[in-house]
Image (tube, helix red, strand yellow):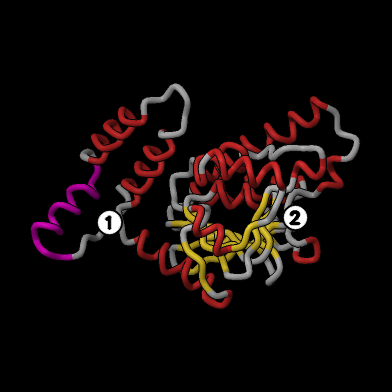
């Protein structure tokens, strides 16, 4: 696909997906969401890609939100379609991906931008980051999974406070509440993301995919997460990577996993 709003680069087994609308503070318009769907789908299906780091171009914003101009004149059914399409084609695709995704949050992560970061498996923020869900100031609520994922990450009370006040929080506050995993100086943001992802990529790829699936099952209504864990644990025994991992452990050497 010929991307107009994304920059796709690779560094070893790491793929960078950079939202490249700096003049618009990397706002998520319809085309950008379509490109994100294509980029993540391709990355998850590319055997050469071990994991993904997503970030925003420039120092001011990860993603400052959705492109609100596209919401003007939309009716109830149109609003339902916006939320449904976004969640199904982008945010849920990322959250349920078979490879680790780290959000490197620089500057503003507001509305759909924070929802995008929350769909990722790990979040790292620069010390200048500001995060929030300001949708109620527009007469809306978060529509890309924000009410659900924020509650899972920070708890019901904090989620309701953030959503109903529409206040932004600092990177330090996000770290304290569990919204992000790490806060670093701005120049250290991408190196820290690479450090964590490279450590993850030294582990067994199929086991990583199973871990993501099992952890996600904890928040799916009607699904017994313990049963999913048991099934995924069992599946690992049928992989070549498990055989290699045990052999390496017994032989006191580093394993050489192949994702098989």
Q: Is residue 85 visible?
A: yes
Labels 2 and 1: the sequence-earlier one: 2
Above or below residue 196? Residue 43 is above
For this rendering, which residue is in front, 147 or 121? 147
- Residues packed near mark 1 inside 10 Å, few (<14), some (14 to 19) or many (20 plus): some
Q: Residue furthest right?
A: 73
Q: Position of residue 118 (x, y in %)?
A: 56, 48
Is 220 displayed left or right of 231 in the figure?
right
The part of the chain drawn in magenta is 239-253
Is 250 displayed left or right of 25 in the figure?
left
Q: Residue furthest top?
A: 222
Q: Which mark, residue 27?
A: 2
Say which residue appears at 51% left-offset and 53% top-offset. Answer: 177
Is 115 displayed left or right of 223 in the figure?
right
Q: Which mark, residue 95?
A: none
Is residue 79 covered in magenta? Answer: no
Tell me the chief SS of the magenta region: helix
Above or below residue 258? Residue 164 is above
Is 221 displayed left or right of 113 in the figure?
left
Q: State the residue position of label 1.
A: 257
Badge 2 vs badge 1, beta-carbon distance below 8 Å: no
- Quarter-wise, where is residue 74 in the image? top right
Say which residue appears at 54% left-offset and 38% top-offset. Answer: 156
């Amino acid at each position: 696909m010929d991307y107009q709003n994304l920059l796709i680069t690779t560094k070893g087994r790491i793929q960078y997906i950079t939202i490249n609308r700096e003049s618009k503070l990397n706002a998520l318009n319809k085309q950008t969401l379509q490109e994100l769907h294509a980029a993540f789908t391709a990355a998850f299906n590319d055997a050469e890609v071990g994991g993904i780091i997503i970030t925003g171009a420039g120092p001011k914003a990860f993603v400052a939100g959705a492109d609100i101009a596209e919401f003007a004149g939309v009716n109830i059914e149109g609003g339902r379609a916006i939320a449904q399409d976004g969640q199904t084609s982008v945010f849920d695709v990322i959250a349920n991906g078979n490879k680790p995704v780290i959000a490197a949050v620089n500057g503003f992560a507001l509305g759909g931008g924070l929802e995008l970061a929350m769909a990722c498996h790990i979040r790292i923020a620069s010390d200048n980051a500001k995060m929030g869900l300001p949708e109620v100031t527009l007469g809306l609520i978060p529509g890309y999974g924000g009410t659900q994922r924020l509650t899972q990450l920070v708890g019901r009370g904090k989620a309701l406070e953030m959503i109903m006040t529409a206040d932004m929080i600092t990177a330090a506050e996000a770290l304290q509440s569990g919204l992000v995993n790490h806060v670093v100086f701005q120049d250290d943001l991408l190196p820290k993301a690479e450090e964590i992802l490279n450590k993850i990529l030294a582990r067994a790829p199929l086991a990583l995919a199973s871990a993501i699936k099992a952890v996600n099952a904890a928040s799916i209504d009607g699904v017994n997460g313990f049963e999913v864990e048991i099934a995924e644990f069992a599946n690992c025994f049928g992989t070549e990577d498990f055989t290699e991992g045990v052999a390496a452990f017994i032989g006191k050497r580093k394993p050489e996993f192949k994702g098989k």
